[in-house]
Amino acid sequence: MTKTLPAAAEPGESNRPPRTPPAADSARERLIDSATREFAEKGFAGARINEIAAAASINKQLVYHYFGSKDALYSAVLEHALRNSRASDSKLTVSLDHPEDALRQFLDHITRTSTAGFRLQRLLMDANWHEGRHLESIEDMSEDLSQRYRLLEQILGAGERSGVFRSGIDARDLYISILGVISVRVTNAYTLSRTLRADLLSEEGRTKSRANALDMIVHSVLRKDEGAAGA
């Protein structure tokens, strides 16, 4: 049996206004790109609308025309970044007949898309400083992202039934743990590289550390006899 993650909604699809002219679309996209850089570098509190507009070569008043407020612009940036991180989800197909392989495929996909860039991680860290309030206006975000851990739940269930995985693993908690294990290698790459002499700044070092992390996650869900057999 194979399972595929559903495609992510287009950014803003759930509450997008009527189609705007191409020129307006271009201006809005430039604002999103400019705001993404500004918010990632300076956070919500430090970012300035006039600097965002200037970087996008757009009149400051157009920012308020398209988004209404700085808060709404920040929400739009978060939505765009999060939905883009799921853009390739529909390409992930796993076979539940081989649970361990399915889990490794899932982990490989999730860790590549969820930690694809330092900018996304900076945005998420800043959004958490503001208690996630800017995500409240994004419709269907919870349902959109929950598709991932539902697939993980199916993989874990298949593994438990076949005797490969231990029982009682909560898919949601495991998903959160996966993001934590992998994200710290992005958000703390510079400090860990300096304090622990960990090579997290080179492509080779990141690849090796990531592979070790994925192996650790897989072995944490294997039944003890399975883990011993594969050791």
Image (cartoon, grey):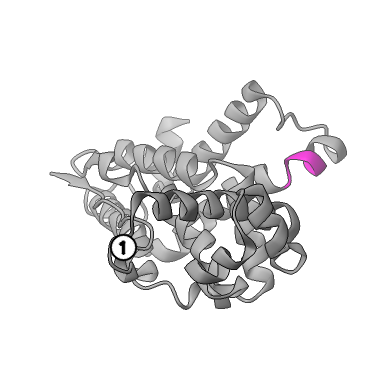
Instruction: Residue under label 1, please give it.
Output: 13
- From the top left corner, tell me how far across and down residue 168 is, in percent: 37, 65
Q: In which quarter of the image is the N terminus?
A: top left
Question: What is the total number of numbered labels drawn onto the structure image?
Answer: 1
Residue occupying the point 86% across, 36% down = 194
Q: Any magenta on residue 182?
A: no
Q: Along the line of sight, which residue is nearer the eye, 80 or 141? A: 80
Residue occupying the point 65% across, 43% down = 186
Q: Along the line of sight, which residue is nearer the eye, 172 or 63? A: 63
Residue occupying the point 66% across, 56% down = 52
Give the residue type at disc 1. Glu
Q: Along the line of sight, which residue is nearer the eye, 157 or 227? A: 157
Q: Can residue 80 be seen in this view?
A: yes
Residue 119 shown left or right of residue 72 in the figure: right
- From the top left corner, tell me how far across and down residue 112 is, in percent: 48, 39
Which span of residues is magenta-colored?
Answer: 188-192
Above or below — where is 140 with respect to 42? below
- From the top left corner, tell me how far across and down residue 169 is, in percent: 40, 62
Q: Along the line of sight, which residue is nearer the eye, 109 or 85? A: 85
Residue 45 shown left or right of residue 109 in the figure: right
Residue occupying the point 28% across, 51% down = 155
Q: Is mark 1 on a helix, strand or loop?
A: helix
Q: Quadrant of residue 200?
A: top right
Q: In which quarter of the image is residue 125?
A: bottom right
- The residue furthest left is 1
